[in-house]
Amino acid sequence: MTMKLSVYPRRVRDLFAALSLRRTSAGRVHIYLRIANVDGSVQHYYHFLLGFLAPLALFADACERENARALIHVRSCEPLDGLLREARFPNVIIHDPVAHHEGLEFPPGDAVETVTIGGFDHPRFYDRAILNAVEATMRARLHDAVAHETAALRKKLRPKK
């Protein structure tokens, strides 16, 4: 089953009320996610951060809570994919932009949901509550990794006795 759903940025947190992330006995749930940033290329930092990463962070976080086995398939942001990997989204799979645009093949028996969400990369979509939610989500996701790296850096910078 494929569900097409357009979501404006203010509704991204409520998206899961409309999705049927059912657990299938035959396989996994795949979410074919199209993130429609407002303007510009997601290969540029500003559009990547607000038009791609921010909505993905909220979506992936909600998806993990709703159905931890669901996999989210997104297009590559090419030079910025390293940042996507550093964000540690365990349920996100990055695909070549052309393959993602043309369509992906999924195993028979797996449930597939096609979802389109909007980005926040235009001033009319700047919303303090949403950006605060993105910040809290990313802080929680990266807290342990940042603490570990900070401790390692402090250890290296200690003066030798």
Image (cartoon, rainbow, N blue to C red):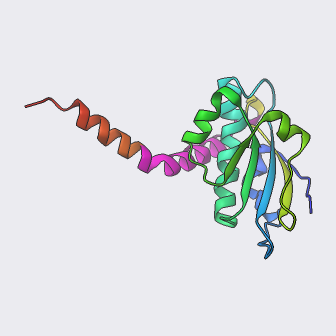
Q: Where does residue 2 sit, x and y in percent of width and height?
A: 92, 58
Q: Is residue 47 left or right of residue 33?
A: left
Q: Is residue 11 left or right of residue 49?
A: right
Q: Going 69% across and 23% down the picture, which residue do you hit? A: 44
Quarter of the image with the C terminus in it: top left
Majority secondary structure of magenta residues: helix
Q: Is residue 105 left or right of residue 43?
A: right
For residue 45, above or below residue 81? above
For residue 140, above or below residue 125? below
Q: Is residue 139 left or right of residue 44?
A: left
Quarter of the image with the N terminus in it: bottom right
Q: Where does residue 105 sit, x and y in percent of width and height?
A: 86, 52
Residue 139 on the magenta segment: yes
**Front residue (pair 105, 118):** 105
How many marks can you see?
0
Write down the quadrant of residue 95 in the picture: top right
**Front residue (pair 132, 46):** 46
For residue 22, above or below residue 159? below
**Extreme residue toward the bottom, this view:** 25
Boundaries of the magenta span: 125-145
**Front residue (pair 118, 99):** 99
- Residue 18 in view: no
Q: Going 78% across and 63% down the picture, which residue do you hit? A: 29
Q: Where does residue 73 sit, x and y in percent of width and height?
A: 76, 48
Q: Where does residue 7 sit, x and y in percent of width and height?
A: 84, 48
Q: Going 36% across and 45% down the picture, which residue do you hit? A: 148
- Residue 69 in view: yes
Residue 78 on the magenta segment: no
